Image (cartoon, rainbow, N blue to C red):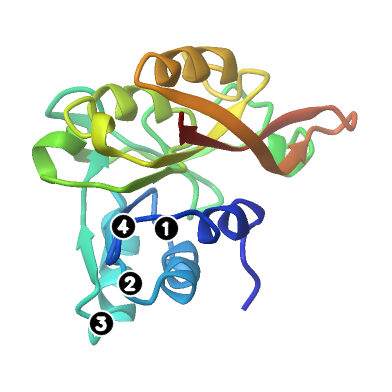
Amino acid sequence: MRREGWLDRLAGLPLPAGPVIVDGGANKGNVAARLLEAFPGARIEAFEPQARLARKLAKRFAGDARVAVHALALGEAAAQLPLRVMNRPTLSSLLPPTGIRDKYAGEALAVTDTPRVAVARLDAALARADVIKLDLQGYELPALRGATGLLPRVAAVVAEAALAPLYAGQALLPELQAFLEGFGFRLDGMYDFFRDGTGRIVSGDALFLRL
């Protein structure tokens, strides 16, 4: 099974035995499966706000006690907020899409549904995390702000980071970097870049490691 670029780097780090890994924006569970391949003794805490996808996740990992599925969005404060589900139904965000999408060469994505979903602080949902991975379609910084109680003990953060705004109000890479530097992380590398219709790199997976 192919690993993400950042996962090869992560697999070489001296993480604690039996690490607790947060998969924020777990979607269909493909990244969770790769994480378990790289860390067979890990505990995966998978967060997915779309009810349909959360049910599929729970079914996929029903026989695996290493994976816990939370039908929640991650944010800065507990709330009930509208989730914008787009016409590619595995894509959803708590922020409005701007219409310029990195992964789809500029194709405008229509919002087809806006169910209200429960939003939780990560440090209220969990007592421990060793690695935090976030792919939240522009909502990575609020989720990190909701993890401040955990961040001092986290070894690595992987966050989808944009170089150009893909959603209204989205924090870009420099803001994510500045926030995490305040908790003792440095930007180690960028992986799996996406380009817009002009070929410009507009987003990628940023790996932050504790100094």
Mark 2 and mark 1: Cα distance apart in space: 9 Å
Q: Is mark 1 on a helix, strand or loop?
A: loop
> Between disc 1 and disc 4, whose residue precedes?
4
Q: Nearer the viewer, mark 3 or mark 4?
A: 4
The mark found on residue 64 in the picture is 3
Query: Would you call the spot at circle 2 few (<14 residues within 10 Å), some (14-19), or many (20 or more)?
Result: some
User: Is 39 placed left or right of 167 in the picture?
Assistant: left
Is residue 170 at all visible to an observer of this figure?
no
Mark 2 and mark 3: Cα distance apart in space: 14 Å
Task: Give yes or no for contact between labels 2 and 1 (Cβ–Cβ under 8 Å).
Answer: no
Mark 3 and mark 4: Cα distance apart in space: 21 Å
Q: Which of 75 and 101 is in front in this view?
A: 75
Task: Give yes or no for contact between labels 1 and 4 (Cβ–Cβ under 8 Å).
Answer: no
Task: Give yes or no for contact between labels 3 and 1 (Cβ–Cβ under 8 Å).
Answer: no
Quarter of the picture holding the N terminus: bottom right
Where residue 209 appears, as percent x and y from the top left, is: 48, 36
Mark 3 and mark 1: Cα distance apart in space: 17 Å
Residue carrying label 2: 56
Q: Nearer the viewer, mark 2 or mark 3?
A: 3
Residue carrying label 4: 16
Residue carrying label 1: 27
Query: Would you call the spot at circle 3 few (<14 residues within 10 Å), some (14-19), or many (20 or more)?
Result: few
